Amino acid sequence: MSIKSVVKVMNFHSLLRVDKSREKAKKYLAVEKVLTDMIDNIVNNRNIVLDYKTLRVKEDMPVLNIYLGSDMGFCANLNTLVNREMETEEENARQIIIGRKIRPVYQERILLHLTREEYEENNSKVMKILEDGIRGLEYSKINIIYNHYYNSTQVELQRKQIFPMVNTNRGEEKKDLYKEDFACEGDINKLLEDLMVLYMQYSMEIASATSSAAENMTRQNVTTESLHKIDEREEVAQMQERKANKDKQFAKVLDNFTKIKHY
């Protein structure tokens, strides 16, 4: 199989994976929005804030950063962005690294290091760390750092804070809801913990899917450019071959003419 055929196959598969990842992210986004609204109504409700100590983080606890990289070829620039972000992280940070090409600076900060394939086959280890971190209030903040796919021309590095939830700041739209009173039965903190665990799990799946779309889009763009360069080289080679054939024919005609003249 020629190099061009291999690149064409890679290009086609990357384009298919972009659509698959994008559709997967859309599915999880719908659930994440519902969970976000539910948590937002609890965390920012004026009466609950006054009456309950709902999931208060400890500011002196370490930060947990989750880095999502790419294991695919032709995606070096995406991994470079993630690696650079790692170099500027907080001194008390802990790390979950997903991607074999992410190069940690401080080995002692790593809680878990998986390849993308290992994460996609079984993400239970990552989810367990997140769940334990929420229920035990082990972290002051949890961030996901990944390359976010927006469209075929826009991919950007994103640092998404998933805990504590960033104030949605929905203004007048939510002002009256925040004043509603609640009849709360049972442990509201337990309910909020369960919701936050679900929210973080869906956030991870969204980040993984959009990151996958970003890497496949990058791969598709690079392979498309490679195909153009291969076509250009083939065209140059064909032109050189045609010129060489013309030169041979001309030399042959000239040789025959010389022989006839000599005769």
Image (tube, grey):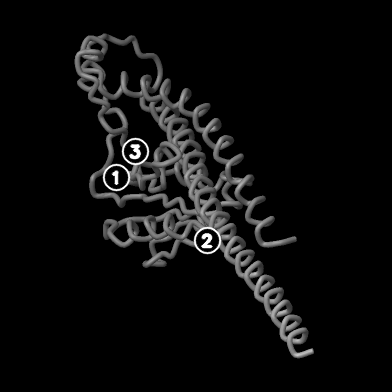
In the structure shown, which secondary structural element does the residue marked by tag 3 occupy?
A: strand
Given residues 247 and 240, the one toward you in this image is: 247
Vertical arrangement, residue 18 with respect to residue 232, above or below: above
Residue at (51%, 56%) from the top-left corner?
99
Which label belongs to residue 163?
A: 3
Which tag, 1 or 2, sits closer to the chain's start? 2
Mark 1 → mark 2, Cα distance in angstroms: 27 Å
Query: Is residue 168 shown left or right of residue 39?
Result: left
Where does residue 188 sit, x and y in percent of width and height?
Answer: 36, 22
Residue topped by disc 1: 140
How many callouts does the rendering have? Answer: 3
Q: Nearer the viewer, mark 3 or mark 1?
A: 3
Query: Is residue 147 shown left or right of residue 17?
Result: left
Res. 179 image quadrant: top left
Given residues 49 and 146, the one toward you in this image is: 146
Residue at (56%, 45%) from the top-left corner?
123
In the structure shown, which secondary structural element does the residue marked by tag 2 occupy?
A: loop
Residue at (41%, 47%) from the top-left corner?
146
